[in-house]
Amino acid sequence: MSVSIVSCERSREYSSAMASDASSVKVGFIHFAMWIYFFMNITLTCFYLRVRVPP
């Protein structure tokens, strides 16, 4: 009986650790995507300002 309780506790800890890891990966990916968007926006803005034809 005590063995099943211990294994249940371990599986719960393991699943919560996996959920925590998945959450941190998701947040990391969103952070990475935000930085990519920021740098692309700056790059394109500089490109358009340099290439545009003056009136």
Image (cartoon, rainbow, N blue to C red):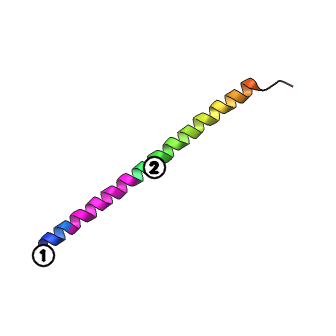
Q: Quadrant of the C terminus?
A: top right
Q: Which callout, 1 or 2, points at the residue further toward the start of the chain?
A: 1
| Residue 38 image-quadrant placement | top right
Q: Residue at x 36, y 52 (%)?
A: 21
Residue 18 rendering spot, x and y as whole percentages: 33, 56
Mark 2 residue crowding within 10 angstroms, few (<14) / some (14–19) / many (20+): few
Mark 1 residue crowding within 10 angstroms, few (<14) / some (14–19) / many (20+): few
Q: Mark 1: which secondary structure?
A: loop
Residue highlighted by disc 1: 1
Q: Is residue 46 left or right of residue 26?
A: right
How many numbered discs?
2
| Residue 10 image-quadrant placement | bottom left
| Residue 20 image-quadrant placement | bottom left
Q: Is residue 48 above or below residue 7?
A: above
What amino acid is labelled 1 in the image? Met
Q: Residue at x 49, y 44 (%)?
A: 31
Residue 16 rendering spot, x and y as whole percentages: 32, 60
In the rendered structure, does residue 13 fall within the stretch colored magenta? yes
Q: Range of the magenta residues?
A: 8-22
Give the number of the disc on residue 27. Answer: 2
Q: Mark 2: which secondary structure?
A: helix
Q: Is residue 3 above or below residue 17?
A: below
What amino acid is labelled 2 in the image? Val
Residue 5 rendering spot, x and y as whole percentages: 18, 71
In the rendered structure, does residue 37 fall within the stretch colored magenta? no
Q: Residue at x 40, y 50 (%)?
A: 24
